[in-house]
C-alpha cells in the first residue's frame, strides 16, 4: 500500500509502492486464472523480486538514466574511429537488474521451460509487465534481445544458433549480448519493400552495404538487418534477405543518435554499412517472411510495455487522488474522476486478459490458435498502445500540475508513451495487417468460434467481415478497422464473462463482471460502487 503523510503537515500526497507484484491483486488473480499451479510456483520468486525492484531500485535509476541519455563517442584517444555508444552508470545498473536477473535468459533454460511448459510466455510477459512499470527505455533492448533469440532459435542454422543463442540468453554481464532489428530506411519507413540496402554473396557469408535510418538499441552486439539480395527482384519484399550482422566484425558507422521525444535512456541512431559481414537467417529470398517471427514477438512485448505503462500512471493517479482532498472531499469521490478511471482501468485489465490469451496461443500448435494469433497480435498491439497514450495523458490531467513536472513519473511516461503506437508498425499498419489476416486467412472466423465457445455471440460481426472483400478496395481498410474494433471488444467481454463464471473466488468474479459490463457501456452498479470494485480493487493489495 502507498504511504500516506499527515495531510495537515503536507497536503500533497506521497505515493509510494514497495512491491508492484505483491501489491497488485488484479495481476495475481489473472495469473491464477491463466497458469497452472507448478508454473505459478516456479515463477512466483522471479515476479516478487521484479516487483520489488520495479518499485524501488530500478524506478530510482530510471529517472537518472532518462536525464543522462547515451552519447556517441566517434573517436578514441588515438584518433581512431570507434563509433562507440557511452552509457550512464544508471543505465548499466538497470541492465544488471534486468538482463542480470534473467528477464531474457531464464526463459531459455531447460529446467525453467520444463516447469513453465505452455505458460512460458505468460510468465515472461508478467515479469516484463512489472519491469515496464519502472522503465520503458531499457525495455526496448530486452524485447529486441528476446525476439532475436527466438528468431535464431527457430530459424538460424545450427552453427549460428550455437554461436549466438548462448550469448543472447546469458545472464552474465561478461558474456551477454543484446539484439537489435535494423529495418527502417529513408526510402521505406513502414514500406519495408522499398528498402535499398544490398547484400552480395561472399563465400558462405554475405556483405551488406546501405543506410538504415531508425535503429533502436544501436549499440547492440547482434543486429538483424534486412537487405536486398543481389540479383533478386528489385522491388517489394520479395527478394529481401534477413542477415545476422555481428557488431564485432561489421563495418558499420553510427552517423548520429536521434534526439528523441521519449525513451531517452536507450540510443536510437542512423547507421551506414559498407561491406559489413552478415550471415543469412532462413532462405535469402524470404527474409521478410522470416523476420515476421521477430516482429510478432516484439509486438507482444510492445503490448506488455504499453500495459505496464498504463498500469503505472493509472495507479499513480488513483492513489494520488485517494489521498488528495479537494473542496473538502477526497478527490477520487467525484463522479467525473470515477468515470474516467473506471473506463481506463477496465481497458487495462481487459488488455491484460488479451495479452495472456495471445501468449498462450503463441505456444499452441492447433489451427485455431494460429489463426487467432494471426489476427489478435496486431489488434493487441494497436489497442494497448493507444490505451497507454490515453492513460498517460489522463493521469497527468487528473493529478494536475504536479503530474506535469519531471519529478513525477507521469511526465516521463507521457513522453515515453507516444513511441508505443509507432514501434513495430503504426496503428494504421496494424489495421492493414489485420485486413490481410481477415481476407487471406479468414482469421476472424477462428476468433468468432472462440467467442462462441466462451458463451458469446459474434456471428453478426464474423458474417460482416466475411464480406469485406466485396467493398471497394480503398474502403476495405476502413471497414476492417470498424469491425476489428467490434470483434476485439466482443472477444474481451466473452473472455471476462467466462472467467467470472469459472472463478470460485468471491472477490474476483464481481470485478470481472463489472469490467465486462463497463466495456459494453452497460455498468452493472452505481458509479461509486463500480469505482470501488474496478479501481480500488486493482490498486489495493
Image: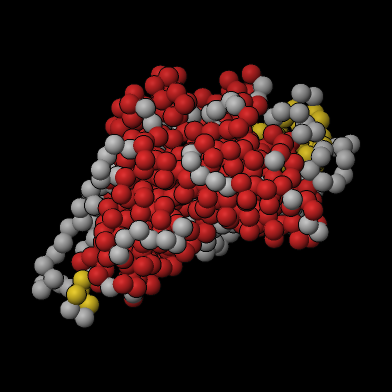
**Rendering coords of residue 307 (x, y %):** 44, 51
Which residue is nearer to you in this view: 84 or 398? 398
In this figure, what is the number of numbered marks? 0
Pinpoint residue 70: horizontal percent, then vertical percent. 48, 54
- Which residue is located at x 24 percent, y 52 percent? 540
Front position in the image: 58 or 112: 112
Task: Give the vertical position of 527 relative to 33 (above or below).
Answer: below
In the image, taking residue 61 as reference, residue 80 lies left or right, namely: right
Write the residue at 85% across / 46% down.
235
Q: Quick check: can you spot residue 126?
A: yes
| Displayed quadrant of residue 309 | bottom left
Query: Residue 157, percent across and down?
Result: 67, 21
**Extreme residue in the bottom direction:** 327
Front residue of this view, candidates 491 and 210: 491
- Residue 355 visible in rendering: no
Residue 60 position in % (x across, y down): 31, 53
Report which quarter residue 536 is drawn in. Answer: bottom left
Residue 508 appears in which quarter of the rendering? top left
Can you say whether 63 is above or below 273 in the image?
below
Q: Which residue is painted at 60% across and 23% down in the image? A: 161
Residue at 55% across, 46% down? 457
Q: Is residue 358 left or right of residue 89?
A: right
Amino acid at each position: 500500500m502507498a504511504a500516506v503523510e499527515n495531510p495537515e503537515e503536507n497536503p500533497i500526497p506521497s505515493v509510494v509502492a514497495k512491491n508492484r507484484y505483491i501489491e497488485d491483486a488484479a495481476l495475481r488473480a489473472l495469473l491464477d486464472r491463466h497458469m497452472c499451479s507448478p508454473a505459478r510456483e516456479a515463477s512466483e520468486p522471479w515476479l516478487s523480486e521484479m516487483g520489488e525492484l520495479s518499485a524501488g531500485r530500478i524506478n530510482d535509476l530510471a529517472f537518472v538514466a532518462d536525464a543522462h541519455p547515451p552519447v556517441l563517442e566517434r573517436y578514441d584517444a588515438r584518433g581512431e574511429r570507434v563509433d562507440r555508444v557511452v552509457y550512464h552508470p544508471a543505465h548499466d545498473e538497470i541492465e544488471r537488474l534486468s538482463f542480470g536477473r534473467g528477464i531474457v535468459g531464464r526463459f531459455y533454460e531447460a529446467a525453467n521451460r520444463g516447469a513453465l511448459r505452455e505458460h512460458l510466455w505468460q510468465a515472461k510477459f508478467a515479469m516484463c509487465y512489472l519491469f515496464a512499470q519502472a522503465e520503458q527505455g531499457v525495455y526496448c533492448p530486452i524485447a529486441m534481445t528476446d525476439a532475436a533469440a527466438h528468431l535464431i532459435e527457430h530459424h538460424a542454422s545450427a552453427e549460428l544458433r550455437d554461436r549466438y543463442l548462448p550469448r543472447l540468453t546469458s545472464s552474465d554481464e561478461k558474456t551477454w549480448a543484446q539484439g537489435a532489428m535494423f529495418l527502417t530506411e529513408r526510402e521505406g519507413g513502414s514500406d519495408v519493400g522499398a528498402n535499398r540496402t544490398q547484400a552480395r554473396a561472399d563465400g558462405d557469408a554475405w556483405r551488406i552495404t546501405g543506410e538504415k535510418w531508425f535503429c533502436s538499441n544501436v549499440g547492440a552486439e547482434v543486429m538483424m538487418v534486412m537487405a536486398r539480395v543481389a540479383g533478386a527482384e528489385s522491388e517489394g519484399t520479395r527478394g529481401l534477405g534477413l542477415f545476422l550482422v555481428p557488431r564485432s566484425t561489421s563495418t558499420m558507422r553510427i552517423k548520429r543518435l536521434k534526439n528523441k521525444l521519449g525513451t531517452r535512456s536507450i540510443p536510437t541512431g542512423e547507421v551506414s554499412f559498407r561491406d559489413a559481414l552478415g550471415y543469412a537467417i532462413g532462405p535469402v529470398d524470404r527474409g521478410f517472411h522470416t523476420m515476421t517471427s521477430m516482429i510478432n514477438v516484439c509486438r507482444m512485448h510492445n503490448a506488455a510495455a504499453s500495459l505496464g505503462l498504463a498500469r503505472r500512471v493509472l495507479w499513480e493517479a488513483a492513489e494520488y487522488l485517494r489521498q488528495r482532498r479537494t473542496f473538502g472531499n477526497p478527490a477520487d469521490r467525484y463522479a467525473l474522476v470515477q468515470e474516467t478511471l473506471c473506463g481506463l482501468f477496465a481497458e487495462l485489465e481487459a488488455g491484460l486478459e488479451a495479452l495472456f490469451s495471445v501468449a498462450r496461443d503463441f505456444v499452441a500448435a492447433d489451427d485455431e490458435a494460429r489463426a487467432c494469433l494471426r489476427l489478435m497480435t496486431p489488434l493487441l498491439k494497436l489497442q494497448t498502445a493507444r490505451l497507454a497514450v490515453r492513460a498517460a495523458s489522463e493521469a497527468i490531467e487528473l493529478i494536475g500540475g504536479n503530474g506535469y513536472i519531471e519529478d513525477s513519473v507521469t511526465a516521463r511516461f507521457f513522453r515515453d508513451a507516444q513511441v508505443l503506437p509507432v514501434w513495430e508498425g503504426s496503428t494504421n499498419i496494424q489495421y492493414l495487417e489485420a485486413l490481410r489476416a481477415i481476407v487471406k486467412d479468414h482469421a476472424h472466423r477462428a476468433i468468432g468460434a472462440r467467442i462462441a465457445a466462451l458463451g458469446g455471440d459474434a456471428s453478426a460481426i464474423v458474417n460482416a467481415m466475411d464480406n469485406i472483400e466485396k467493398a471497394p478496395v480503398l474502403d476495405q481498410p476502413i471497414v476492417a478497422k470498424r469491425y476489428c474494433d467490434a470483434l476485439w471488444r466482443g472477444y474481451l467481454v466473452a473472455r471476462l464473462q467466462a472467467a467470472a463464471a469459472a472463478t470460485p473466488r468471491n472477490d474476483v468474479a464481481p470485478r470481472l463482471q463489472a469490467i465486462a459490463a463497463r466495456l459494453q457501456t452497460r455498468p452493472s452498479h452505481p458509479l461509486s460502487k463500480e469505482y470501488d470494485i474496478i479501481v480500488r480493487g486493482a490498486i489495493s493489495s
